[in-house]
Amino acid sequence: FRPFVGQLGEDDVVATGVCGAGGNLAALMRALREMQEADTYTLESTIPNLSGLLAENCMNTATISLPARALSKEMVGSPVNTASAAQLLTWYPPRGTLRLLKDEHTKGDRLLMDRIVAEDYFLHTMHFFEGDRVECAKRLARSMPLKYSYEISLCETIFGQMLRLPTSEYKTLMYSTIMVDLCKLIGTFSRPIFACMKECFSRIHFMDQFLVQRLAEWLAYHVSNYNFQWPWERWAHVLEAPDPDLQKRFCRDVMSRMVRLSYYDRVIEVLPDSFKPLMPPKPQCQPLPGLGAPSDDLEGIWAAKAVDLIRKKTTDEQLDDWMKQHSIEAVLGGRIQLCKMLLRALLVAGQKTYSHMIIALERYYGPLAALVQEGGQEAQTACMDTIWQVWSQNIQRASMVIDRMMTLRLISAKAVVSWVFDSGSIKFTEGHSRYRLAYEALLHTINKVSARVDDARQDIATINGDATLPEGEREAKLTEKRSLLHDNEESLKETVMLVIERLVVSMDEMIAANEGSLGSFSALPALAASDLTDPGAAVLYDLAQFTHALIRYYYESVALCGERVS
């Protein structure tokens, strides 16, 4: 649970931070030892009335003897022990403390325990008021029982929660909105934000890949609230860096997410001229050949004719009859080509908005589903090729289409994984857009399967909590849902392990192809510290990082796979 896999130098204390419970327990023990050595147990952060009452109650309470527990003697890493540890981590998630700033700015001359208690105030306030963003921000800004200026500690705590491993307690948007509101309520709150961002950016080369994406998502939202103003000139050195440079790619990711939050022209208008080359292409659908215009794209010509029918709201039966009447399958050379043509037409017809796309896919689900089911895995992979062909300049829309088609069971998780690895999309040499879509597609796919597990568990909980259901009906529904839950859990394990196995195979292939010039990927810090200007080294580093992050993110599913993990 280390957010950074390497250090900037020997004295880089920030990079040695740990998000797991072990690091927090060690900090708590250090704080207690510090109080003992100083022979003082008075804290500035405590609420006098409550702390006095608590001390009095403790003195008057009878001693309680806890039952003895036998500790496991199994080595960490064995299948049984790993599964138990995964379950324990589910029950007791990490606190998520991340030290980004020097103690002189956050702790001052106070005791470490003061800082821990103050963090508890922040965490409890966010926990109980996260449903009311405005009230939560007001309480964090003005109602903390602290006698000193605490905005720097507050900012660092929020960053630590947002960048907690393996997952944050809330979505990134929650922390983003709170920080925006705090900037309005506390005039100097933007300063610690810049300081925390500076420390993170300087360690992008070592940061966990999932955390880099969270950070990019947060920064894009944050600047969108301030007309996309940011001191970009402080990062001007990335402009001279090669494309594989991790800081340069972070800037690309931020700008790609900025475009998702506003109009492309507005973003590029306020961006400094020197940074405009890092902007993604203008998000738009690849046009089809004009009707009657000469073109070598036979598939595109028929797709354009199909779009014309779709826009006239032709029924799915009429569209199916039209394709048979003109023998388009024979003209294009097979059912797979026919499937690609139809999907291409539907995506172009629904390009205006996300809702238009959903309506097009659902209205003509019948003909498309028949072609996909008949074509099997090959047809699903062809659908992935078509999605990229139509939306290669809009990663967000491509991801939306993949998500929707998975919901409609037109594309399976296995098909997405196969497309990502077999098409070479996972390699940086394919271009930043396709490279980023590959990773987004993998994450969306696993998250989609994981969501099905969560939905099944929620359905079981709902049935158990419904007191009005007759016993016989309850048992029948529970049996059905438990079977569905088991199938979804197995699907999640298989999907996660398939991705990990393909990642490891890709890394082996890259090392073999480069005849050992890339070294070993067993030690991530050494690879991170190496020169990542070489595209092969950058890809290898990303693959290794993504593999580590994936195992950590889905630790419970991976642990249940036992020896297969080795």
Image: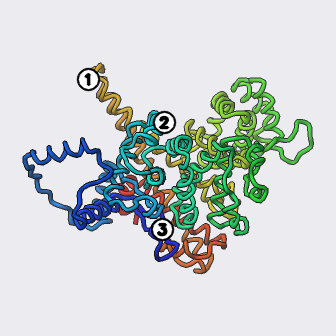
Where residue 40 sits in the image (x, y, percent)? 23, 60
Q: CA distance from mark 3 to mark 2?
A: 33 Å
Query: Which quadrant holds the C terminus?
Result: bottom left
Q: Which residue is mark 1?
A: 471
Badge 3: how crowded within 10 Å, few (<14), some, or many (20+)? many
- Front one among 439 and 29: 29
Q: N-terminal of the two: label 3 or label 2?
A: 3
Query: Which quadrant holds the N terminus?
Result: bottom left
Q: N-terminal of the two: label 1 or label 3?
A: 3
- Quadrant of res 374: top right
Q: Are marks 3 and 2 in contact (CB under 8 Å)?
A: no
Look at label 3 and name its amino acid.
Answer: Val
Residue 133's tag is 2
Residue 5's tag is 3
Look at label 1 and name its amino acid.
Answer: Glu
The residue sitting at 69% across, 54% down in the picture is 433
Position of 457 with respect to 531 (left or right) is: left
Element type at mark 1: helix
